[in-house]
């Protein structure tokens, strides 16, 4: 017999080691049948008592139908139902918006609760890893309410104690696929109280024509497009700086032009002015006469930026100790420096001196210009630090279609992608669609910029442009 090698020795996996000699386990006690029955009866009573409160319309309808039937029989019931149906028809035709809010969307919410969310809740959450277990019992987050808007379902959820909204935020893709929605976004309402928003249709699928030029423009709230919920997307320029990021063809031009368009009344009245830098000469040169200053070469762009810095510092000097906020006037107009393809100046320009001076000027403008009425609106294709290390100096960012998932957080800040800002998944057929973070909310909102066509720009220059470039003096008179 061959001598056994130490490594080949048979090990008895179940042989107890001394520490495992005693095994304690929970004793199994049979629950008396009467207790189980009692519990079922209690739950049934609670259900019957709570039903009218949870579903007042359904319970009321059924109860009223039963009363009518008991007094007037089938014929009476048929007459009452026909009259009610006719009433609803008249309501729908006569007052469609109130019918939509009070009847259609509520009925849809009840249906979606029953057919989609309640039915699939447990399997989807268990597979997505959102069910918790404790002492061999499974705990599921509970659906509190389902409501429907014209474009999305909002599922209000009560979290299991000990879990956080971040658990849901990191599983938005699983939830969206699980409930057959194109995406999912999470909003936190309070402790253990969140809302999962599942869009039903893409309200931004159709391009949006240029918005009408407003009568008066407020540079702190310029209408530039539409939000996913159908409301207007307002972009703030006064008091901030905005960086618009997107791959080539993502629609950066439409954000810039929509902002310029909304600013036209202020430009016309002299309380705002736009200085444009257009290294590609393809974007802003088209509406050149709308701009108080225009530059398209590296040297002239740097000169323009340095001039802006000088005016900003002169204004800050005048305001020092007298005024803390800027109010746009013709003497001190709100100045927007529009920079298309900012990386041309900060990274790609062959002259190192131009790059350095441009970077210094942009950094000074973005770090000091906000409160004295200077704003930088810059467009960029590649948000990586090597290309644009100043991106954190822009408080507001717009993420159009991006190349990579990792770029989403670079643009919109940490956690934006987990919250559903899938800018890297925006279809190329949807230029102008973007994710933004609105003031006071960490939840990214999907928006689409209105498309300002060449004809619109022609009309704008014809009405608001000046044939000769307006000289800009130190005092800012345009
Ligand atoms: N908001 C929009 N709605 C519909 N179509 C748009 C919108 N914005 C842009 N487009 C279409 O996409 C094309 C490219 O847009 P745009 O020139 O603005 O892209 P860009 O991001 O500026 O690209 P680049 O970096 O190459 O300049 C436009 O010619 C237009 O046809
Ligand atoms: Mg462009």
Image: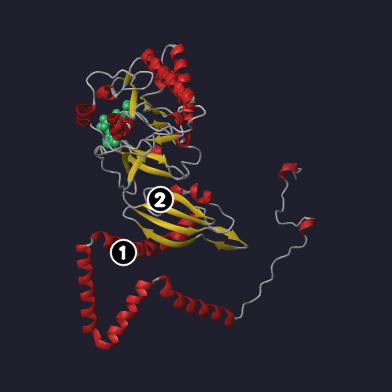
Q: How far across and how far down the image is residue 253, in percent?
A: 31, 30
Q: Is residue 212 visible?
A: yes
Residue situated in front as seen by the camera: 53 or 182:
53
Q: Decide if residue 140 is on the left or right side of residue 375.
A: right
Residue 300 numbered mark, or none:
none
> Label 2 to label 1, Cα distance in Å?
29 Å
Residue 75 figure quarter: bottom left
Q: How far across and how far down the image is residue 151, in percent?
A: 32, 52
Residue situated in front as seen by the camera: 143 or 176:
143
Residue situated in front as seen by the camera: 9 or 240:
240
Q: Is mark 1 within 8 Å of ligand 1?
A: no
Residue 379 to residue 14: above or below: above
Name the quadrant of the C terminus: top left
The residue where tag 1 is placed is 102
2 or 1: mark nearer the eye: 1
Name the quadrant of the N terminus: top right
**Secondary structure type for disc 2:** helix
Residue at (69%, 68%) from the top-left corner?
A: 26
The residue where tag 2 is placed is 177
Residue 336 to residue 40: above or below: above
Ligand 1 shows up in which quadrant of the image? top left
Q: How far across and how far down the image is residue 53, in percent?
A: 42, 73
């Amino acid at each position: 017999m061959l001598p056994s090698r130490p490594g080949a020795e048979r090990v008895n996996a179940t042989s107890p080691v001394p520490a495992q000699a005693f095994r304690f386990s929970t004793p199994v006690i049979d629950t008396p049948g009467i207790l189980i029955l009692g519990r079922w009866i209690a739950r049934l009573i609670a259900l019957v008592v709570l039903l009218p409160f949870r579903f007042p319309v359904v319970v009321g309808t059924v109860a009223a139908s039963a009363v009518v039937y008991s007094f007037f029989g089938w014929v009476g019931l048929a007459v009452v139902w026909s009259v009610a149906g006719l009433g609803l028809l008249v309501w729908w035709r006569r007052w469609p918006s109130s019918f939509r809010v009070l009847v259609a969307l509520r009925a849809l919410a009840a249906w979606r609760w029953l057919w989609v969310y309640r039915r699939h809740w447990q399997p989807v959450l268990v597979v997505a890893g959102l069910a918790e277990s404790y002492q061999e019992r499974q705990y599921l987050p509970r659906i509190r309410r389902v409501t429907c808007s014209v474009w999305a379902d909002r599922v209000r959820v009560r979290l299991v104690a000990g879990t956080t909204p971040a658990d849901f935020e990191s599983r938005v893709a699983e939830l969206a696929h699980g409930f057959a929605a194109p995406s999912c976004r999470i909003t936190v309402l309070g402790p253990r109280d969140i809302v999962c928003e599942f869009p039903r249709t893409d309200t931004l699928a159709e391009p949006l024509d240029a918005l009408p030029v407003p009568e008066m423009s407020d540079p702190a709230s310029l209408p530039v497009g539409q939000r996913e919920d159908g409301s207007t997307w307002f972009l703030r320029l006064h008091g901030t700086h905005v960086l618009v990021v997107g791959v080539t063809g993502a629609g950066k031009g439409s954000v810039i032009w929509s902002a310029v368009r909304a600013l036209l009344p202020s430009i016309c009245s002299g309380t705002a002015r736009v200085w444009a830098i257009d290294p590609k000469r393809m974007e802003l040169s088209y509406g050149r006469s709308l701009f108080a200053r225009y530059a398209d070469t590296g040297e002239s762009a740097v000169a323009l930026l340095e001039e802006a810095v000088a005016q900003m510092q002169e204004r800050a000097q005048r305001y020092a100790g007298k005024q803390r906020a800027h109010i746009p006037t013709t003497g001190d107009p709100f100045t927007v420096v529009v920079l298309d393809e900012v990386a041309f100046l900060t990274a790609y320009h062959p002259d190192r001196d131009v790059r350095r001076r441009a970077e210094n000027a942009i950094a000074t403008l973005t770090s000091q210009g906000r409160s004295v009425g200077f704003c930088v609106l810059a467009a960029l294709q590649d948000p990586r630090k090597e290309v644009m290390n100043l991106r954190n100096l822009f408080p507001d960012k717009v993420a159009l279609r991006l190349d990579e998932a990792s770029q989403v957080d670079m643009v919109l800040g940490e956690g934006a992608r987990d919250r559903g800002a899938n800018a890297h998944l925006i279809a190329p057929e949807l230029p102008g669609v973007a994710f933004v973070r609105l003031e006071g909310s960490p939840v990214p909102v999907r928006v689409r910029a209105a498309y300002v066509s060449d004809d619109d720009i022609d009309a704008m220059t014809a009405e608001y442009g000046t044939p000769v470039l307006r000289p800009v003096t130190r005092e800012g008179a345009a």
